[in-house]
Amino acid sequence: PFLIEPFPAIIGPLLVGRLIVRTHPELQGKDAEEWMAMAPMEMGRYADLLLNAILGILIFYFPGGYTWMLFLGMTASHVWIYAFDHFRVLRSIPACTFAAFDIEWWCEACLAPIMGIIAACLAFKSNCEPGMYCLTGPHLIGVCCLAWLLHTVVHTLCLIHLVPKFGKRPPAEDPAAHETFSSLAHRLPCSWFTANPIWCLRSKHTYSHFPPCSYYQLGKENLMRVNEKIGCFFEEGAKDGSPSARTRPPQKAATGSMPGPPSARRQVGSETSPNATPRW
């Protein structure tokens, strides 16, 4: 199944999306882009790896013979998965941000009972070996369960108390203590303002900001324009947070009424003036 995963995960959705967009002219703009885009990255790979670990451990319960071949095949499968995910992250998915360690920790915790199966298998295989115990029936099942439970408890306690001792200590001073909204917004295009479509509409149609607050869309950061007076600081390619010539207000603006109904008319000069004060 790992070898054919690129087809249902990347190639198949891309071909179907192309077919749908080509045969439906009504799909325009963002709708067409969404049909052509790949599904976002998710954490289902953790479940795949845990399942593979369970299947690999259960092999030990059966007579040996093909164990090495099975584990070599599993190793090759994991190398393939790593290469495929590496390609998918760099070339296919739009973007992903995993800012917390919670999923990783809980997957490590789920690994404790899975690794406990190894201890239960060892207790099962040691039965009636030279110099070892020889049990049958419920007693053997109880010993296997006890080995599983003991390993799970010890594994979990080590994960909670021992592993953190080998981690990095938190810095004495918060490296982001002097971070401000403006300095962060110079580097990150997505903020409370740019991610809020209602605020972007108000900026353009109610407050008549120039330039108005640009709505953040993934992959279209190059269209965002700077207006520091309303909290918009990001511009792709700008240095030192200074707006480029493309986003600076014009030096001279024509005056006059805009065409349209009386309720929609407004003075162009007041909209484009660099000294205009925005109404919050």
Image: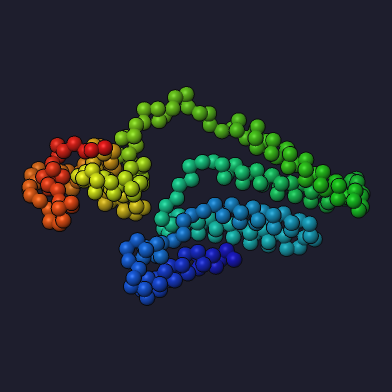
Q: Nearer the viewer, residue 77 or 146?
A: 146
Tell me: 242 left or right of 27. left
What residue is shown at x 82% (from left), y 43% (from top)? Answer: 146
Residue 26, by quadrant, is bottom left
Q: Nearer the viewer, residue 198 or 99?
A: 198
Q: In this view, does 280 lie above or below 256?
A: above
Q: Where is residue 132 in the image (x, y as percent from the top left)?
A: 89, 46
What residue is shown at x 73% (from left), y 63% (from top)? Answer: 66
Q: In this view, does 123 lie above or below 171?
A: below
Q: Position of residue 204 (x, y in %)?
A: 24, 48
What residue is shown at x 36% (from left), y 42% (from top)? Answer: 191
Q: Nearer the viewer, residue 221 or 198?
A: 198
**Is residue 130 visible from the viewing direction of this image?**
no
Q: Where is residue 86 in the image (x, y as percent from the top left)?
A: 48, 55
**Is residue 200 visible from the viewing direction of this image?**
yes
Q: Residue furthest front?
A: 262
Tell me: 114 left or right of 24. right
Q: Which residue lies furthest to the bottom in this view?
A: 23
Say which quadrant the N terminus sits in: bottom right
Residue 81, by quadrant, is bottom right
Q: Where is residue 265 in the image (x, y as percent from the top left)?
A: 15, 51
